[in-house]
Amino acid sequence: MGTAIEWTDTVWNPVTGCSKVSEGCRNCYAFALHDMRHKAFQEGKKLPQQYAKPFNEIQLFPDRLLQPLKWKKPRRIFVNSMSDLFHGHVPDEFLDQAFAVILACAILEGRNHTFQILTKRPARMQRYFIDREPTELVKAWAKAGDGWIHVGDGDEYFSGYIGSITRYEWNADGSAKAGSEYKPFGHLEGIFPLPNVWIGTSVENQQAAADRIPLLLETPAAVRFLSCEPLLGPVDLEFWTQFDHPDNEGYGVEAIKGIDWVIAGGESGKNARPMHPDWAEDLRDQCEGYGVQFFFKQWGEWAPVHELLCNEPGIKGKPWYHFDPDISVCRVGKDRAGRVLDGLEWDEFPAYQERLLK
Ligand code: SF4
């Protein structure tokens, strides 16, 4: 399924439905879109059955799990654009099945996708990834794929296949490394953390940064990212002075090195809140300073127009918001506002992932 989201190619929605957890959720587009269709469904409009239920009911769609294995061209896949994969009502067993598919894509020829998983529930995500030892977790994913994920000539159980490729450390010629102990699921280099997964959390303001970034950093991942959209306040990534954590040493600047990519953007939609241009520019500057890749998604509904006059064509009569005497934004609409920051479009991606997509 194509998407208008600038930093991905496709969405994959094996789960729909969610509930609001923080300020960033206030104008959730998925909520608004689903509930509009739910109302239309109730009024008798012909729509898919998923709209029979309101958005706050979590719905699992096992029949969608195999979709990525059918897509042959490498894609960036945004997982659950209409939900949060780590919502408390998504059972671990279903997560295991979703990760079985992702694992299959990591090891099968011609399924070189990248899975972008973004959550506002990093506590559950962290527990999911660390409560079981990596060996147990990979084994659970492999077993969850038995009988419906087909590998080899199709008659081998998925868990048998994963067990066999992880039984030794391998040399480049396919022989077992000298001294490597026979242990199915015991040799996980290149498999765990999953090399084809980017794990991200939403950071709309400093509170979300303090609450969520430590949990993200404690989650094993090949690539970690932040989605600072909608950006509702300034975010200082050197946040170690703002949160109290028993392992505080090693956070701060060292922690930023654990972040590979930052997306930033203003809010769009009917009730969009304005973003101060300094918040986006400052985040960009921090990323540049620390060597973190930066992607500016959009200004959103409100664009900085302090260099323009109120009677400029296209500006006249539109609502304004004045942050201070020097900085104003005008509600010109998402398309007109565009995505140019300081004269440039910022389209950086994690270098690691770019290699995987080739
Ligand atoms: S977590 Fe995401 S999908 Fe869920 S309500 Fe918030 S913004 Fe919407």
Image (cartoon, rainbow, N blue to C red):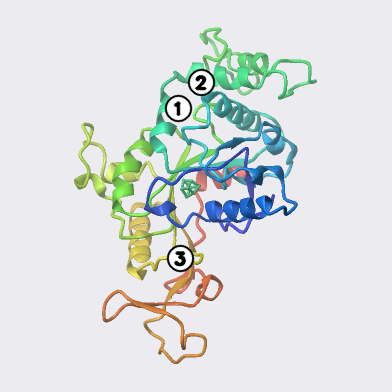
Write down the residue under mark 2.
Answer: 137
Q: Position of residue 263 (x, y in %)?
A: 45, 55
Residue toward you, 299 or 185: 299
For badge 2, the amino acid type reads: Leu
Q: Nearer the viewer, residue 281 or 187?
A: 281
- Would you place residue 169 above or below residue 266 in this image? above
Residue at left 52%, top 17%?
Answer: 187
Hey, which residue is sitting farthest front in the picture? 43
Disc 1 and disc 3: Cα gap in Å? 36 Å
The circle drawn on residue 275 is none
Q: Does the residue at mark 3 contact the one at mark 2 (Cβ under 8 Å)?
A: no
Give the total number of marks visible in the rendering: 3
Q: Quadrant of residue 178?
A: top right
Mark nearest the camera among 1 and 3 is: 3
Q: Looking at the image, is mark 3 or mark 2 nearer the viewer? A: 3
Query: Would you say the residues marked 2 and 1 are in contact, meaning their CB atoms lie under 8 Å apart?
Result: yes
Instruction: Please tell me which of labels 1 and 3 falls first in the chain.
Output: 1
Amino acid found under the numbered disc labelled 3? Asn
Q: Nearer the viewer, residue 43 or 158?
A: 43
The disc at residue 129 is: 1
Residue, x 73% and y 41% (percent of image)?
71
Residue, disc 3 = 271
